[in-house]
Amino acid sequence: MKKLLIALFVVAAAAMVVVPAYATELWDPHLRGLNEGLAAGALPPPGVYFINNSYFAPNYQAYGNLHGTLTVAPSGHGNTDVKLFAYVDIPVLLWVPGCKFLGADYAMGIAEPFDYTNLRIKGATAAALGLTAQNNSGAQWGAYNTILIPYELSWKLPCDWFIKTGLGVILNDGTNNPATADTLGPGVFAESSNGFYSFEPTLGVSWLHQGWNVSVDFHYAFNLKDSGTDYTSGQQMAIDYTVTKTCGKWTFGLGVAEETQTTSDSLAGNSLDDSKANAWTMGPIVGYNFGPCSVQFIYNFPLYVNNDVGGEWFDVRFVIPLWK
């Protein structure tokens, strides 16, 4: 299959898409819906913040044409032979020094995600790939690529509007474990990171008024070629939508995530048909502010997935000020 998913960015980081040995492309640059619940256009007060997301995708399926292997299911329909359990932990350090640039508040950050994946291929799909009962699943821990945030700039506008721009640089320094395929069989492992660099400019817009947070968080990823495979992942747009209301210490609301691949993948410079991924998810957001620390619980169910993996996912986000 072509993709199994997950990705990363900050002000609450994001990361991840996975593939077995039959595929060439690994992770999507932005973890689907990871920034739901955040004020996408604003920065917190000056200080150093530790942000941790614990992201669970307990039962992802393959959907549509995942280029590079079998056509596993018609467009928008899942194949229950291909299942993925994924856990991604994304620790982030965000520094807001309190200085301004071009009239905007400035911040920078770094994220070092790690993940656990368990890919299971059974039934007719396992038989077509030549897998047996002994080698049709694989599980491993690994480190995703380092994500650098050299800048985020946030402007406060009239009428409680905020706008923020930033850049994510995803390094080619993660871990993979292809040797395990020699003992467990081909096509069973979802590797832990990408073998290429990505650059991801971002734009966030928020309306923050009397406890309301209406935000749109936009990411656009440019992926460089994987020199080891001569494969280039297409450019991807990811948008996280948030509508929440805070009452006292509690926050309630709704989030929506969109993933749209805008250009096709290519192999050795040749464009690949049926390689554009598209996915939509939606679900509730609940948060609680303990004082200096806060927590949010986010759940999304799938609305539509094609040429990717998808399903329900959960995220638990802690924000802890280390220094203010």
Image: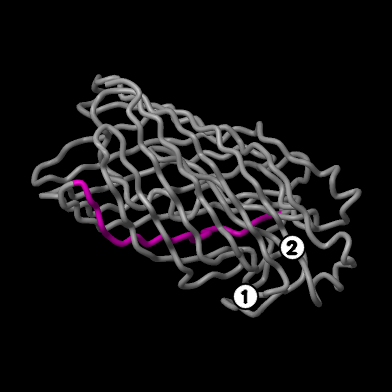
- Asked if residue 188 lies left or right of residue 207, the reply is right
Residue under pointer 1: 78
Of the numbered discs in the image, which one, if any, rests on residue 120?
Answer: 2
Q: Secondary structure at mark 1?
A: strand
**Which of these two is toward me, 59 or 187?**
59
Out of 54 and 216, give the one closest to the viewer.
54
Q: Amino acid at mark 2?
A: Arg
For disc 1, the neighbor class at 10 Å (few under 14, some 14 to 19, many from 20) is many
Q: Along the horizontal axis of the image, is 156 left or right of 273? A: left
In magenta stretch: residue 258: yes
* Residue 93 pos. (x, y %): 43, 28
The span picked out in magenta is 249-266
Q: Seen in the image, is 320 located left or right of residue 55?
A: left
Q: Is residue 208 above or below residue 49?
A: below
Q: Quadrant of the C terminus?
A: top left
* Residue 101 disc label: none
Task: Report the Cα–Cα distance between label 2 and label 1.
Answer: 14 Å
Locate residue 219, reporting x and y percent: 42, 48
Residue 76: image location, x then y, percent:
57, 76
